[in-house]
Image: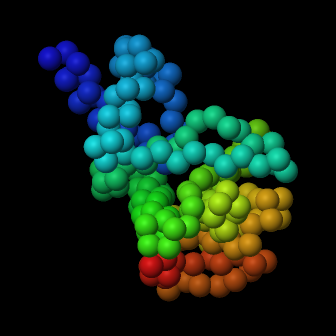
Amino acid sequence: MHDLSLLQELAALLPERASCRLSLNNLREDLGVAHKTVSHWMDVFERFYYHFRITPFATKTAASLRKEPKLYVWDWSVVEDAGNRFENMIASHLLKFVNFLYDTQGYKAMVHYMRDRDGREVDFLITINQKPWFAVEVKYSETAISPHLSYYMQRARIPFGYQVVATPGIHRIRDSIHVISASRFLAGLV
């Protein structure tokens, strides 16, 4: 019965950590359980479609970190912070998109994120056969292009870049980066 209450506590903790890098050690400390236990529970939750993880993309050109995945929950409505909820929604649609490409066309498409030791991060990178296809930076309301997105577009030679915003009716291109409303961006996926 004690394990059940700890599992419920874990389920309550995860939406607070949505759109953030996942530290199993922090979860282990919060729950007071062994690292192996929390790792097993996270795997079980993932198999039951409670959450999913997106791993970092490693490049030789950027001093990439090859560590912690970012956590997202399938039911993004449970995420309280509006910005994190918005990023979580985009993440789930991108994951569905790459799964669709694999299931229907056989493409080895993956969703990653990019982050280097200097803290420059781009929310999502879609790859085909481990080669960058397009990058997505999610900003709830900011339409000024993220310098991190510009940086990675050049350094990793990413062909297409998108900064997705919640504000409807936006689509402009600046420096090969599309600043686009989520409704237009998501309509173009499938």
Furthest toward the front, the residue is: 106
Q: Position of residue 102 (x, y in %)?
A: 49, 65
Quadrant where the image shows the N terminus: top left
Q: Nearer the viewer, residue 57 or 177?
A: 57
Q: Position of residue 186 (x, y in %)?
A: 46, 76
Q: Nearer the viewer, residue 162 or 143?
A: 162
Quadrant where the image shows the C terminus: bottom left
Q: Position of residue 113 (x, y in %)?
A: 61, 52
State the scheme by which the image is colored: rainbow
Number of numbered discs? 0
Horizontal arrangement in the rendering, residue 140 relative to residue 173 (left or right): left
44, above or below 175, in the image: above
Taking the spot 58% from the left edge, 36% from the top edge, the residue there is: 68
110, above or below 170, in the image: above
* Residue 161 seen from this side: yes
Taking the spot 71% from the left edge, 39% from the top edge, the residue there is: 65
Could you say which quadrant of the image residue 143 lies in?
bottom right
126, above or below 167, in the image: above
Taking the spot 55% from the left edge, 83% from the top edge, the residue there is: 170
Taking the spot 67% from the left edge, 49% from the top edge, the residue there is: 57
Q: Position of residue 60 (x, y in %)?
A: 82, 47
Could you say which quadrant of the image residue 39 lies in?
top left
* Residue 86 seen from this side: no
Furthest toward the left, the residue is: 1
Could you say which quadrant of the image residue 36 lies in?
top left
Q: Nearer the viewer, residue 98 or 124?
A: 98
Horizontal arrangement in the rendering, residue 28 relative to residue 185 (left or right): left
